[in-house]
Image (cartoon, grey):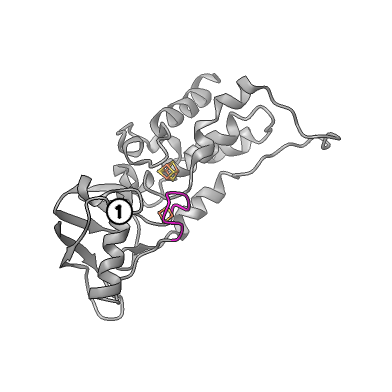
């Protein structure tokens, strides 16, 4: 099929502002958007810049805005998107070049919620045991691949660069609800700040955007309940 890719381009060494450029390519309906971008880069314009690594929905590096929705380019089929495809970097992030955005503020927020097990007791001789039921409580939020698609689809995140954003909250959930963890108070202290969890306006864009099908809004609401009602 003949496809028109309209891609937002920005070269910080040449451009004052980003602009769209269109490319006509031949693609198979079963090609992924990542294949289409590679076709442009390899055969039409080698200056096109975008992140990608695993090409299998695992590394989280190729989240971008595809026809207005944040998606992983390696998971979307050209045939499902259509013959006219607009590709932009995620909103709410500073553009470094073309589709590559500055992820450092995102990871700084992620680090702020202490995304690791905290337990102040002496380590047991074997592993710290946990029942299957207790493990199930935070199973969904273990699946995050830190692609940023949720935060980059969140209107409060677009308008307030200080908002901690859904991805950091999801990763706080993964530990706050872990029965072996003792760091909840430290994480909740971060999430209680003015740019913390209550900046969320329950828009649900994050849940729609998540390529791992994590119920992001539900996880955020569960944290709000713990903070408001201790349950
Ligand atoms: Fe990506 Fe989903 Fe994790 Fe958000 S919660 S960073 S959308 S994997
Ligand atoms: Fe790794 Fe798409 S390239 S998730």
Q: Looking at the picture, does residue 231 appear above or below residue 165? A: above
State the residue at coordinates (44%, 36%): 197
Q: Looking at the picture, does residue 64 appear above or below residue 49? A: above
Mark 1 residue element: loop
Residue placed most toward the observer, 99 or 46 = 46
Q: Which residue is mark 1?
A: 32
* The N terminus - image quarter: bottom left
State the residue at coordinates (18%, 55%): 85
Residue placed most toward the observer, 171 or 213 = 213
Q: Residue 87 at x, y = what percent?
A: 23, 57
| Res 198 → quadrant | top left
Count of picture labels: 1
Q: Looking at the picture, does residue 119 appear above or below residue 1? A: above
- Tell me which segment is drawn in magenta: 53-60
| Res 180 → quadrant | top right
State the residue at coordinates (23%, 52%): 78
* The C terminus - image quarter: top right
- Specify whether residue 27 is painted magenta: no
In the picture, measured across the screen, residue 110 lies left or right of residue 31, that is right
| Res 129 → quadrant | top right
Q: Residue 52 at x, y = what percent?
A: 41, 61
């Amino acid at each position: 099929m003949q496809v028109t890719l309209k891609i937002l381009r920005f070269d910080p060494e040449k451009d004052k502002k980003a602009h769209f450029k269109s490319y006509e390519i031949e693609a198979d309906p079963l090609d992924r958007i990542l294949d289409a971008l590679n076709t442009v880069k390899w055969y039409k314009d080698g200056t096109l810049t975008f992140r990608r690594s695993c090409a299998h929905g695992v590394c989280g590096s190729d989240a971008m805005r595809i026809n207005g929705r944040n998606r992983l380019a390696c998971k979307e089929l050209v045939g499902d998107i259509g013959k006219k495809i607009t590709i932009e970097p995620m909103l709410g992030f500073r553009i470094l070049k073309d589709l590559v955005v500055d992820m450092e503020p995102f990871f700084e927020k992620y680090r702020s919620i202490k995304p690791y097990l905290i337990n102040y007791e002496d380590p047991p001789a074997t592993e710290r045991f946990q029942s299957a039921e207790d493990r199930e409580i935070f199973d969904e939020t273990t699946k995050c691949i830190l692609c940023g698609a949720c935060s980059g689809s969140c209107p409060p995140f677009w308008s307030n660069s200080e908002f901690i954003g859904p991805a950091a909250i999801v990763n706080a959930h993964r530990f706050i609800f872990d029965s072996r963890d003792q760091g909840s108070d430290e994480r909740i202290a971060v999430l209680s700040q003015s740019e913390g969890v209550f900046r969320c306006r329950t828009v649900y864009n994050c849940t729609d955007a998540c390529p791992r099908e994590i119920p992001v809004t539900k996880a955020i609401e569960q944290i709000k309940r713990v903070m408001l009602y201790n349950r």
